[in-house]
Amino acid sequence: MKWLATALLAALLLLQYRLWLSNDGMREVRRLQAAVSAQQAENARLTERNRQLAAEVHDLKQGYAALEERARSDLGMIAGGETFYQVVPPKPSAPPVPPPLQSPQRTAAAR
């Protein structure tokens, strides 16, 4: 009977080792949970992007207002009868450059 208890204890310890310390045990479960969590976050981001793109496609198919707005912003188009004004910011003025200094010997020799 003593050998049966020892064998069961050894089997229990071996299974506990595989569960907690081996690469196929709880470490793998935690790694897979983190991977699933990251993939769910990525899926949520992509689902939101797809929803926005679907709304934009719907707007472009339904009316000309969204199409006109897109043409104005992306292509710089203007409608007939409109006047285009482009506002250009002024260039920053450069500070004046002082004339080069002459040495006192040179000015005395020039006299």
Image (tube, grey):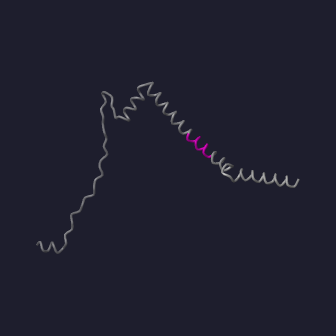
Q: Based on the displayed image, in which of its 4 quarters is residue 33 positioned?
A: top right
The residue shown at (33%, 29%) is: 79
Give the answer, above or below, for where 11 lies relative to 74.
below
What percent of the width, then of the height, locates residue 17?
72, 53
Q: How many marks?
A: 0
- Residue 40 in percent (x, y) is at 59, 40
User: How far across and how far down the image is residue 8, in percent?
Assistant: 82, 51
The answer to whether 24 appears left or right of 54 in the picture is right
Tell me what residue is drawn at x 51 percent, y 36 percent: 49
Q: Which residues are magenta?
A: 34-42
Left or right relative to 56: residue 104: left
Q: Position of residue 87 (x, y in %)?
A: 31, 41
**Quarter holding residue 71:** top left
Say above or below: 92 vs 101.
above
Q: Give the side of residue 17 with respect to residue 93, left or right.
A: right
Q: Residue at the location (21% across, 63% down)?
A: 99
Residue in front for this viewpoint, 91 or 72: 72
Q: Quadrant of residue 74?
A: top left
User: Is residue 2 shown in magenta?
Assistant: no
Height in image: 106 above or below 63?
below
Q: Nearer the viewer, residue 27 or 59?
A: 27
